[in-house]
Image: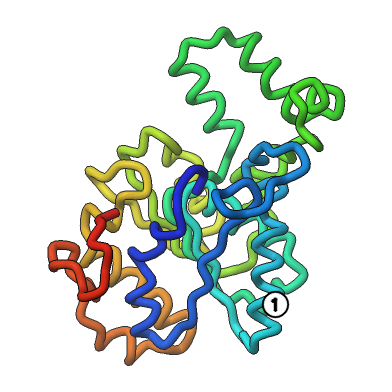
Amino acid sequence: GHGSARGEALRVIPLLHRLGLTSLTITYRNDVGAPASADRMHHLGSAEWEDTEAAIEYAVAQGARRLVLVGWSMGGGIVLRTSVRSAHRDLIEALVLDSPAVDWQDILVYHATALKAPAPMRRLALWMMTSSIGARMVRLHEPLALHEMTPAYYGRHLRHRTLLFHALDDATVPPAPSRHLAALRPDLIEFEPFEGASHTREWNRDPARYERLLADFLGDALGLGEQAAALEVPVRDPAAPALEGSIGLRL
């Protein structure tokens, strides 16, 4: 997600490891330690999906035969965009989305409204991000393809099984677009709302439920049903002491 660290993925990596899956946790342009884009600005997934595509190509070169893409927040939006644009779509077995940025226009308008920005200012900001002339005015290297990052667009183009977690109390990425997308594609999307959790904190709220849902979904999608069913969850109790050699920090 935007402004987060790869350590966020440690919520699910122990479970994936128990299922025998190899994990590659990536950074993308403008992340700490990653190369900057030409304009040094985040593109909300509009361009960052290309870095996920590069990671997919690396994984395939190392022998990966099937892929599961997992993303939180803006990372979830990047996963969706990768899934509909990747040259390796046939290798993607499933998606796992946690509080994903499904509709950036909705998110931007939501936050602008919360800041009491006037409607004309909101419209101007969206125009500057999405038009060639406006993009140059705010020093974006290219316009953002916000029209391709909506529930309607993904509903038309999605073709992968998807497990979608979203906190109903999410005040960063409102859950309505996730619910809308799930309603558009009930044939592909399993929507799992979480009560009482804030943004991307569904696992923190109920790790046993989160991991059971994730294990069963992956077990079914990847043909690992018996192995997944035998897992005791949560794989690692969040209240357990730090492992030997760990820095001991909590997410």
Residue 10, picture quadrant = bottom left
Is 52 drawn above or below residue 175 in the view shown? below
| Circle 1 SS class | helix
Instruction: Name the residue located 38 percent from the left edge and 49 percent from the top edge.
Output: 166
Given the current orientation, which residue lies at the most extreme bottom position?
226
Which quadrant would the C terminus be assigned to in this image? Answer: bottom left
Q: Position of residue 13 (x, y in %)?
A: 38, 72
Residue 89, percent from left and from top: 70, 72
**Can you tell which quarter of the image residue 18 is in?**
bottom left
Task: Please provide percent x and percent y for residue 198.
Answer: 30, 41
The residue lying furthest to the right in this view is: 133
Residue at 55 percent of width and 24 percent of height: 109
Question: In the image, is residue 37 above or below residue 54?
Answer: above
Res 180 visible: no
Give the number of marks. Answer: 1
> Looking at the image, is 207 positioned above or below residue 102?
below
Could you tell whether 105 is left or right of 87 in the image? left
- Which residue occupies 68% across, 82% down? 60
- What is the three-letter code of the residue carrying label 1? Asp
Q: Nearer the viewer, residue 208 or 180?
A: 208
Scheme of image coloration: rainbow
At 39% from the left edge and 77% from the top edge, which residue is drawn?
A: 16
Between residue 233 and residue 7, name the one nearer to us: 7
Q: Is residue 83 above or below residue 174?
A: below
Packing grade of label 1 (10 A; few <14, some 14-19, many >=20) is few
* Any part of residue 169 in sight: yes
Give x and y (percent) for residue 34. Answer: 62, 54
Q: Nearer the viewer, residue 155 or 47?
A: 47
**Residue pointed to by mark 1:** 90
156 to the left or right of 160: right
